[in-house]
């Protein structure tokens, strides 16, 4: 029996092109202007597709887009999870297939509405896309990585509105521009197919979008030139760059401790108010291992500075519960603050549904499953109050804002991105902190074991940073900002409005 040749349809090329254009708009290539046009080929192709093929187009686009922005996950699975290379890459592809379901459903809805209504793509695309991104950030513990807004972390005037509408509002804006361009290229065809097709929704929508863009950029320029300084803080970030496979090796415990002590003595010479160590910098269980804890406290008294350190904590000696936490030691060595990580990494810090997935081991080294914290507590010091986000937590805007509903001065992020090597992962992770700074209007102090460490001011401007896979100290000054933003107060109201509008459109589409 003769096999039929593989039939390549035009929509496949459009989906592939859109996926590639969007992927390269993210770090490290940072071709962020492409994000404003990347979806146009996909959106134009959707007009000619039925729901089934539109779903496939969105799915193909999603696999290319998400693999291009999350391929680096294979590095930690392959190098530290004990999984061979090919299965590691396949595991990433499985994740991408799940993530691709969101743009697939979005594409199916857009195609259906373009066929059945006179509504413009500049309304349909951002509505459905924003809803998809928002749901993805919460479903199955959430994975908001690769939200289209993050591609714009360098375009500061355009993203200042994140202090009102959050990161998903910025995504809405970027996708709306893509939709407007697609409308301009489709409107004649839509009119030819439907002689009574009204121009007015598209024209009015484009006009509103144009005015909105001017307002957004004007707001951004105003925000970026505001002086909201509420005092300064001298900080020193210690980047130990301890190799991941040595971090919990007992043979290297003394070596690891000496690296951080030596660098901290160097940091203390700049007379900082606060010295920050990264996530899990302490190679023992803080508090439980009495002798090593006492030795660390004795050393810290020599520094004449507050010391924030990442450590494994064991709060209750009667249980085997451990947390991935942070501890703050005052100048006199007293413990003034403890924080337990709230949002843990699934399959990295715990195994979800462990009774069902009993055969699955954690991919990360450690001492067993961690338990999550439940307290949105800030450290209070003479130089200001701050929250501590640990690694994965910094990608969740809804979690971050909860620390600041009653005020605060700056934000500290401690992380260990050595898992990702020199891939795009550490750069993307760092870029997300720009949005946390703007959403909360808090300067960010970021300490990473292997980089990228650095500071970001409350308008998203990136200050001094370190290079990946280097060891050293970064000393600088940040400005406190006591602003409580609309986003901090009210959260993702904009996203809920998009959800409500999408529901209204879906059930009332025959009226449009």
Image: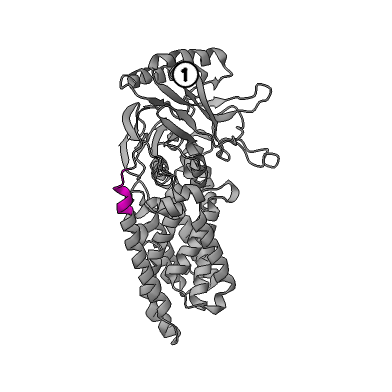
Asked which quadrant contains residue 41, the reply is bottom left
Q: Position of residue 413 (x, y in %)?
A: 44, 35
**Relative height, residue 118 to residue 270 (above, below):** below
Can residue 467 be seen here? The reply is no
User: Where the N terminus falls, by quadrant?
Assistant: bottom right
Question: Nearest the camera: 124 or 499?
Answer: 499
| Residue 432 forms part of the magenta stretch | no
Can residue 417 be seen here? The reply is yes
Q: Position of residue 13 (x, y in %)?
A: 41, 65
Residue range of the region highlighted in magenta in the rendering? 220-227
Tell me the residue that label 1 is attached to: 252
Determine whether, in the image, residue 289 is placed left or right of residue 153: right
The residue located at (56%, 39%) in the rendering is 343
Question: Nearest the camera: 42 or 198?
Answer: 198
| Residue 223 forms part of the magenta stretch | yes
Query: Helix or strand or loop: what does disc 1 sit on?
Result: helix
The residue located at (32%, 41%) in the rendering is 462
């Amino acid at each position: 029996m003769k096999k039929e040749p593989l039939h390549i349809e035009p929509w496949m090329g459009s989906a592939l092109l859109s996926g590639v254009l969007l992927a390269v708009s993210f770090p490290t290539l940072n071709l962020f202007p492409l994000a404003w046009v990347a979806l146009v080929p996909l959106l134009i192709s959707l007009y000619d597709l039925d729901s089934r093929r539109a779903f496939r187009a969105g799915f193909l686009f999603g696999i290319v887009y998400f693999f291009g922005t999350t391929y680096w996950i294979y590095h930690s699975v392959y190098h530290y999870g004990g999984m061979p290379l090919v299965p590691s890459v396949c595991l990433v592809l499985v994740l991408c297939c799940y993530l691709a379901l969101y743009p697939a459903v979005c594409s199916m809805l857009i195609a259906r509405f373009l066929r059945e209504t006179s509504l413009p793509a500049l309304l349909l695309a951002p509505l459905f896309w924003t809803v998809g991104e928002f749901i993805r950030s919460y479903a199955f513990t959430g994975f908001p990585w690769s939200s289209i807004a993050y591609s714009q972390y360098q375009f500061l005037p355009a993203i200042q509105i994140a202090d009102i509408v959050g990161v998903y509002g910025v995504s809405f804006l970027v996708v709306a521009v893509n939709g407007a361009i697609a409308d301009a290229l489709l409107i004649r065809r839509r009119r030819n197919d439907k002689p009574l097709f009204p121009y007015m929704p598209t024209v009015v929508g484009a006009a509103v979008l144009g005015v909105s863009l001017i307002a957004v950029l004007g707001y951004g320029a105003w925000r970026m030139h505001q002086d909201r300084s509420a005092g300064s803080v001298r900080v020193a970030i210690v980047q130990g760059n301890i190799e991941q496979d040595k971090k919990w090796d007992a043979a290297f415990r003394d070596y690891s401790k000496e690296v951080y002590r030596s660098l901290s003595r160097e940091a203390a010479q700049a007379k900082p108010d606060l010295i920050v160590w990264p996530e899990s910098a302490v190679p023992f269980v803080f508090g439980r291992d009495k002798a090593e804890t006492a030795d660390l406290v004795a050393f810290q008294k020599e520094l004449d500075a507050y010391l924030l350190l990442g450590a494994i904590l064991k709060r209750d000696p009667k249980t085997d519960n451990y947390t991935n936490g942070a501890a703050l030691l005052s100048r006199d060595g007293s413990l003034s603050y403890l924080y337990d990580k709230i949002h843990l990494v699934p399959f990295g810090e715990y195994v979800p549904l462990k009774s069902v997935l009993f055969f699955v081991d954690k991919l990360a080294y450690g001492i067993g499953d961690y338990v999550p914290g439940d307290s949105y507590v800030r450290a209070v010091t003479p130089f200001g109050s701050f929250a501590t986000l640990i690694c994965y937590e910094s990608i969740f805007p809804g979690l971050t804002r909860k620390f600041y509903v009653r005020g605060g001065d700056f934000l500290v992020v401690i992380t260990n991105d050595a898992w990702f090597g020199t891939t795009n992962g550490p750069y993307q992770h760092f870029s997300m902190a720009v949005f946390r700074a703007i959403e909360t209007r808090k300067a960010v102090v970021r300490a990473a074991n292997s980089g990228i460490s650095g500071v970001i001011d409350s308008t998203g401007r990136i200050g001094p940073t370190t290079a990946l896979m280097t060891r050293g100290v970064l000393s600088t000054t940040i400005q406190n900002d006591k602003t409580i933003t609309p986003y901090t107060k009210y959260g993702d109201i904009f996203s809920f409005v998009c959800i409500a509008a999408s529901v209204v459109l879906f059930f009332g589409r025959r009226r449009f």
